[in-house]
Image: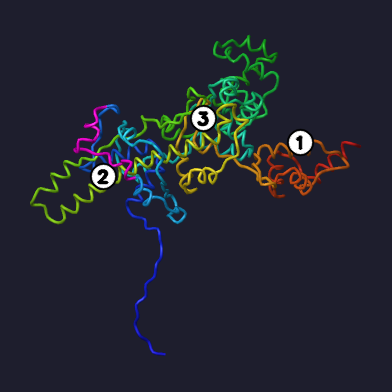
Amino acid sequence: MALAPKLELRQSQQLVMTPQLQQAIKLLQLSNLELAEYVDEQLENNPFLERDETPADGPAERRGESGEHSDQGAAHDDGKARDNLDADYEGVAPGDSGSDAAYGEYRPNDWANMPAGRRSDGDEAEFGATLQCEISLADHLTEQLHLATRDPMELFIGAYLIDMIDEAGYLREDLPAVADRLGADIADVEKTHQLITRFEPSGVGARDLKECLKLQLVDADRYDPAMAAFVENIELVAKKDLKGLIKVTGASEDDVRDMVAEVRALTPKPGYAYGGGTVQVIAPDVFVSKSQDGAWKVELNSETLPRILVNQRYYAEISSAGGADEKDKTYISEQFANASWLAKSLHQRAQTILKVGSEIVRQQDAFLAYGVKHLRPLNLKTVADAIEMHESTVSRVTSNKYIATPRGLFELKYFFTASIASTTGGDAYSAEAVRYRIRELIDGETAGAILSDDKIVDILREEGVDIARRTVAKYRETLKIPSSVQRRRAKLQSAI
């Protein structure tokens, strides 16, 4: 067979990570503070970018309609932005993200003229290099919370309580106020608080000094009646009233002196043992409020969004001037293109956050109205399908973005809870509801009818819950319920 050259035409598609697409992905996953620093850096380096100091309701010609400036995020570019950004981001390198189609009737000029944040002292790598490596108290407690429970309600309440714990390790907000804010039962809040007080460092989550000392003494198995009376009257130590301490504790002078030494060895502010991390005030990216007609109104926080303008007149003057060599012309064109694309990317980032936030509010309206007990099972795919975005885009939008609701300030990802599918194809069941149903079935056992995990699976499937045996075993273990063999043995022993 003879070999001969030939020409063939082949058609294929691939995702090309252009610098512009990388920038859009990067902006989407930044928090509002990181975004402000990044934009400040671009304002410093790009001669065609300017900070817009004009109020949002300023004259139209100063907002870019005179031809001198332009906020390149106009609505007529939405189609082009969609072509560039609407891609399958599972094929993008880890850590990247993406943006999708524009958000309905959202007006770019309403967003483009908003105050920016503080200056940046470096690029993203330099920003990360300045952060402290030591773990913060909140991170340490959050890690223990996820190891201690898988209950969605306890995780939700626990995350809120951890946010309320100050750097010294104290919970400064009353539990009834927390229950009222979240719409949860006070018993659930107290139970979650008790769980947190067993975390390290010992004494964390206390509401005052006496409770902090008590928790540490209980942890050391030194909280007997005499010590309880001593802690309850701890103010006598400050007064150096030794006789008063002897009287209230009923102990000898030597024992009281030992108690004083033991209590002084405790840590009155346990939270200081952990790094505080970078102290930053959390500003919400989205506000939720109730409108006059009873519907939920979702708005972007104008204070967290940068204000930039692209100076087209300056670009036209430089481009038309003679004497520039090819290198200078290339630099001018690249900088103007980067400035224009940055404005478009910022606009699309705002649209995407607003779109995702609006869908989360729609999905979790029962929580906003009635409290944490009505938190719906929700996953990223549900939101992504509803707003026609890629799942990875929703994942990155909900990270480090916060929403201010009538029930408090929450990270967007807090609203995603596990669900169990229905065998009938109807609405999914909350994992929390399934967990409590498992406990209910086991509590109703008799010595002669102990339910195995397989039997529980059969019962739940008859009730319409599509669940696997390993899931039942996992939920049973999180509820700290022994296996069927151990339960049968315990009931037989109790019957003897």
Crowding near the residue tagged with mark 2, few <14, some 14–19, many ≥20 C-alpha atoms within 10 Å: many
SS at badge 1: helix
- Quadrant of residue 493 within the rendered picture: top right
Nearest the camera: 98 or 107? 107
Q: Check residue 62 for magenta coloring.
A: yes
- The amino acid type found where label 1 is placed reads Glu
Q: Amino acid at mark 2?
A: Ala
Question: For the residues carrying marks 3 and 1, which lies nearer the camera in this image?
Answer: 1
Q: How is the image coloured?
A: rainbow
Q: Is residue 481 magenta?
A: no
292 sits to left or right of 428: left
Which label's residue is closer to the chain start, 1 or 2?
Answer: 2
Which residue is rendered at x = 14% and y = 56% of the image? 326
- Residue 429 placement (x, y as % from top left): 66, 40
Residue at numbered disc 2 = 339
Q: Are marks 1 and 2 in contact (CB under 8 Å)?
A: no
| Residue 45: quadrant of the picture | top left
Q: Residues within 10 Å of mark 1 (few under 14, many from 20)?
A: few
Residue ID at (54%, 46%): 381
Q: Could you say whether the residue bearing mark 2 is in a helix, strand or loop? A: helix
Magenta extent? 58-77
Q: Who's the residue at 59% across and 15% down the image?
A: 234
Of marks 1 and 2, the one in the foreground: 2
Residue beneath disc 1:
440
Between the residue at mark 2 and the residue at mark 3, the CA separation in whole angstroms equals 38 Å
Q: Which residue is mark 3?
A: 163
Give the quadrant of residue 264: top right
